[in-house]
Image: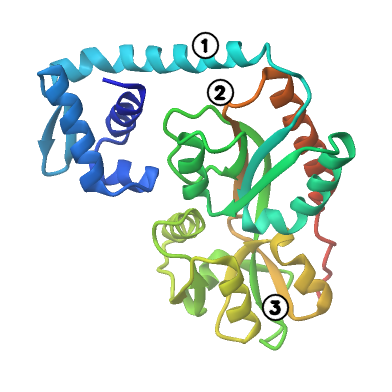
Amino acid sequence: MNSKQLELFVAIAEAGSLSRAAIALHRAQPILSREIRDLENGLGSPLFHRTGRGVVLTESGRRLLPRARRILDELAQAESEARSYGPASLTSATIAMPTTLGRTMLGPLTSAIYEQYGHIHLHLLEGTSAPIVEWLMARRLDVAIFYDTVMMPLLSTEQLCEETMYLVASAKAPRLPPTVPVSELERLPLILPGPLEGLRLLVEVVAAQAGIRLNVRIEADAFNSIRLLMEAGHGYSVLPYAAVQAELERGVLQVAQLVEPEVKRRLVLATCPARLSASSLNELVRLLKSVMQKTMTSPPLVEAN
């Protein structure tokens, strides 16, 4: 039994099924099944009952779960305490954030870090929230920013801010009013990520609450693909203002705030304390928050004609 097996065991127990855990961790389900089977063989006892709807903990599993959580917490704390005696100066840092946020954050953040730590080695990653959570779980990151629309097993997060979501279209499309009810999404051809991505899940939930079905014409997981398809007039999308601010200023896209209800999503921050000293990690988080406060601008007020 090792810490990686315990992490997977806890993630599956919290998800309630191997398939949901595989999606959350971005791991192949057969690999998870094999690793859990190896753990069960090593312990000489089954940990889950397999059912048609997922998995249920056996008596052995129920007894192991709280102990596994405590062991993982103790390991993280021990690594953090050991590293807290390391050098306070940052020599390297790995940071991940959503592509839509990176458009406005990465430049100012890099400048702020190099202004204080001129010889640091930076590794900057962008992606959707699901792989960012996977990278963090695999301890490949020091700091991660992502949207809380994905499962976050074993992660402690801190809310940073909320982003208001907008309907976005080509500037060549019919002129959008300042606000658009969510119910209007039913009649518009939409360009959205696939059904497992956080943005798609958010819009699907809001649509269900409004009693409508989305008209998804094109599925595109990459933000740049969505942007280019919108500019070419192939449909509408739902994005935060900052993600398309440059295109709005160039006059190639237009936006309308979604209302009835307003659509928002939360940006959260999580860290991996096992990689940096406590003082270095705290300083990195401080710099990141400071840059975010300066770069997360509100959209200008739009007056109806």
Residue with the most extreme front position: 119
Q: Amino acid at mark 2?
A: Ala
Under circle 3, the secondary element is loop
Q: Amino acid at mark 1?
A: Ala
Quadrant hosting residue 93: top right
Q: Give the Cα distance between marks 1 and 3.
A: 55 Å
Q: Residue at x 61, y 39 (%)?
A: 144
Q: Which residue is mark 1?
A: 78
| Label 1 close to label 2 by CB (< 8 Å) | no
Left or right of residue 62, residue 296 in this image = right
Q: Which residue is mark 3?
A: 176
Looking at the image, residue 103 lies above or below residue 1: below
Residue 274: image tag: 2
**Mark 3 or 2 closer to N-term?**
3
Under circle 1, the secondary element is helix
Under circle 2, the secondary element is loop
Can you see residue 305?
A: no
